[in-house]
Image (cartoon, rainbow, N blue to C red):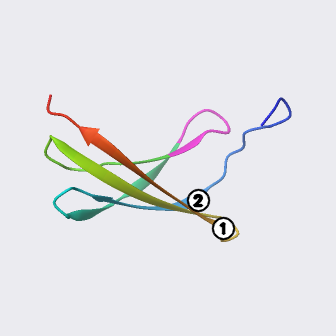
Amino acid sequence: LGDAAQARELAARIEATVSDLRGGTQPVAMREIRGAPGVLDYVGTVRFDAPDTLRFDVRATHSGGVTTSMQFTRDFAPR
């Protein structure tokens, strides 16, 4: 982004689901966390039994109706 880029807070509606390898799917309730000025995060909690591999599907709708989607997978090992 270069030296001229500036981060700015952008509120959004976040929808998330998580799927496991057995085909189970659950919605993830997301909540907004405001940190330092200009920092806005969204977090959610998922219940599962390790070991497991979870696939997260996240959809963010920004003000103005612009939608962005992302998917990622995470492996979890027992403690």
Say the numbered circle drawn on residue 52: none
Residue count near mark 2 (Cα–Cα under 10 Å), binned few <14, some 14–19, many ≥20 = some
Residue at the spot x=61%, y=32% of the render? 36
Is 29 on the left or on the right of 66, as rendered? left
Q: Looking at numbered disc 1 in the image, what kind of residue is underneath it?
A: Val
Q: Nearer the viewer, residue 52 or 14?
A: 52
In this view, 36 is above or below 75 = above
Span of residues in magenta? 34-41
Residue at the spot x=14%, y=33% of the render? 78
Label 1 element class: loop
Q: Main secondary structure of the magenta part?
A: loop
- The residue at which mark 1 appears reads as 66
Is 36 on the left or on the right of 77, as rendered? right
Name which quarter of the figure residue 17 lies in.
bottom left
- The residue at which mark 2 appears reads as 12
Q: Nearer the viewer, residue 72 or 32?
A: 72
Name which quarter of the figure residue 38 lies in.
top right
Q: Looking at numbered disc 2 in the image, what kind of residue is underneath it?
A: Ala
Check if residue 36 falls in the magenta segment. yes
Between disc 2 and disc 1, the foreground one is 1
Check if residue 8 falls in the magenta segment. no
Residue count near mark 1 (Cα–Cα under 10 Å), binned few <14, some 14–19, many ≥20 = few
Is 14 on the left or on the right of 73, as rendered? right
Specify which label sits upstream in the sequence, 2 or 1: 2
Question: What is the quadrant of the N terminus in the image?
Answer: top right
Residue at the spot x=37%, y=54% of the render? 56
Residue at the spot x=45%, y=58% of the render? 58
Rendered location of residue 49, percent (x, y): 13, 45
